[in-house]
Image: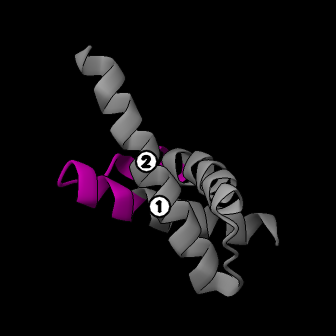
Amino acid sequence: MSFIAWLIIGGLAGWIAGNIMRGGGFGILGNIGVGVVGALVGGFLFSLLGLQAGGFIGSLVTATVGAVVLLWVISKVKSA
């Protein structure tokens, strides 16, 4: 996957996860960062479950799920 596609998917996934978890995004760079790290987390979680998602939509779903999990973990660590 090209670098530009990673940034687009990361930005979209971060924005979606921000809206799900907090009701708002984190700015363009924050969304991209959360989405890219979320893609790594989501890919790891999906591989543990034996799931695979291909294509743009599959990558976006994987990244969004990972970003939501990432934001949830961060919120739990901050509140502790």
Crowdedness near tag 1: few (<14), some (14–19) or many (≥20) residues, C-alpha within 10 Å = many
Give the residue at x 52% y 73%: 61
Residue at the limit of the structure toward the right, as seen here: 1
Q: Position of residue 53 (x, y in %)?
A: 66, 79
Q: Residue furthest top?
A: 80
Q: Which quadrant would the N terminus be assigned to in this image?
A: bottom right
Disc 1 element: helix
Give the spatial CA distance, label 2 vs label 1.
Answer: 6 Å
In the rendered image, residue 4, in percent from the top left (x then y), is placed at: 72, 68
Residue 65: which disc? 1
* For residue 77, side relative to residue 6 (left or right): left
Q: Is residue 71 above or below residue 9?
A: above
Q: Residue at x 46, y 42 (%)?
A: 70
Determine which residue is flagged by label 2. 69
The residue lying at 52 percent from left, 54 percent from top is 66
Q: Is residue 41 visible in this depiction of the protein?
A: yes
Residue 24 belongs to the span the image colors magenta: yes
Q: Residue furthest front?
A: 49
The type of residue carrying mark 2 is Val
Residue 60 relative to residue 21: left or right: right
Q: Which residues are magenta?
A: 15-32
Check disc 1 and give the amino acid type: Val
Residue 51 lies in the magenta stretch: no
Seen in the picture, residue 72 relative to 32 is either above or below; the reply is above
Q: Main secondary structure of the magenta part?
A: helix
Q: Which mark is residue 29?
A: none
For numbered disc 2, what is the local secondary structure? helix
